[in-house]
Amino acid sequence: MPTSELDRLDIAILEALQENACTPLSEVGRRVGLSQPATSERVKRLEDRGILAGYTARLDAAALGLGMMAIIRLKTTQEHIKPALKAFAEMPHVIEVHRLTGEDCFLLKVLVPTPGQLETIVDTIARFGAVTTSLVLRSEPVKPLGKALLG
Amino acid sequence: MPTSELDRLDIAILEALQENACTPLSEVGRRVGLSQPATSERVKRLEDRGILAGYTARLDAAALGLGMMAIIRLKTTQEHIKPALKAFAEMPHVIEVHRLTGEDCFLLKVLVPTPGQLETIVDTIARFGAVTTSLVLRSEPVKPLGKALLG
DNA sequence: CGCAGATTCCGTTAATTCATCGGAAGTTTG
DNA sequence: CAAACTTCCGATGAATTAACGGAATCTGCG
């Protein structure tokens, strides 16, 4: 089994660190009922197991001037897949790339400062196949993963 | 303007912290050519400006037993929107919710351990309208945001 | 039963990292 | 040209993390 037993404490620690990775481990420990060294040790074990894959800064796209998010779907054919992947990698505004089953081959998430930038991106991608572009009107805050472990 | 001037150093700092938020600021400073206190001060300023919105742990979904990602699109009508949003919030496996322009109203990203779980989710969401579900075969690593600032 | 061995915890302490301070250098303002 | 402002540096004090040694609990197996 991939999740070789995470107990309640591990999950609580992961939730705390996902919500704010800078919470002192003594404080995390206090919340879950462990000492600082014990908490530290568990965190280290979670890292060694590859469950805790790292720590990252959360940037505010809007504050960075990237106020427009769009979802682009691409329906293409086999021979375009590799060149398309390469092109996506070189487009800095394309922040997520997913290969899909179903009618569409790719789903991309892009962040741009202006509609004009979006047009440029769509035009470039359209060279590989049929694109469908949707603007994101609103996003609910991304949910922390911890919750999904209990169901 | 939203991006009231970020210089090259700010961008380099953001990139470093996005790649690994635990890099000591003395090390970040060394890379960008600043002392530790100067780096610390810039980070604090970026936080105050709301550009650096926080720090979060990166969890490995597969290692957590959530090896299956799916994209669900929902086409629905006005009166279902609020109840749908509420339902999404209560489903722990739904980790992203985007309101879209275009034919589909919502795009969801879900993480599940088994196809059976996905079926449950799809069935629940289908009560609000017409759903289109695609499995994610592969995802390219999410791109750091810093790159998008230079274009 | 009961004794290794392993695991996980705690308290303490050493090492690392971060925050704060005073002061210098450079820029902008009046 | 001076005053105010900004941003930097080096040094120091405060906070956090990492690394012990030892105690308690659990496991496996004679």
Image: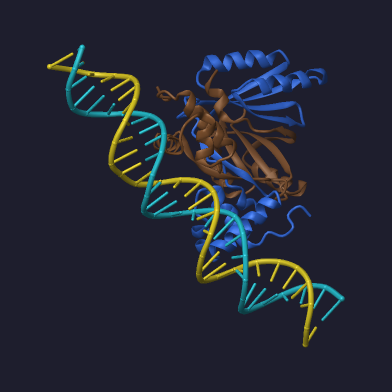
Chain colours: A brown, B blue, C cyan, D yellow
The reply to whether residue B128 is in sight is yes
**Front one among A1 and D21:** D21
Residue at 39%, 37% (x, y): give it: A48
Hey, which quadrant is residue B117 in on the image?
A: top right
Residue C1: x and y, percent?
21, 12
Quarter of the rendering occupied by the N terminus of chain B: bottom right
The front one of A24 and B5 is A24
Residue in the image at 45% along x and 24% along y: A7
Q: Is residue B52 above or below residue A4?
A: below
**Front-lying residue, B67 or C18:** C18
Query: Residue D9 at x, y = what percent?
Result: 55, 70
Say whether residue B140 is visible.
no
- Classify the position of the C terminus of chain B by image quarter: bottom right
Q: Is residue B42 left or right of residue A85?
A: right
Residue at 50% in and 27% down: A11
Residue B53 pos. (x, y %): 65, 45
Query: Is the residue A42 above or below the residue B94 in the image?
Result: below
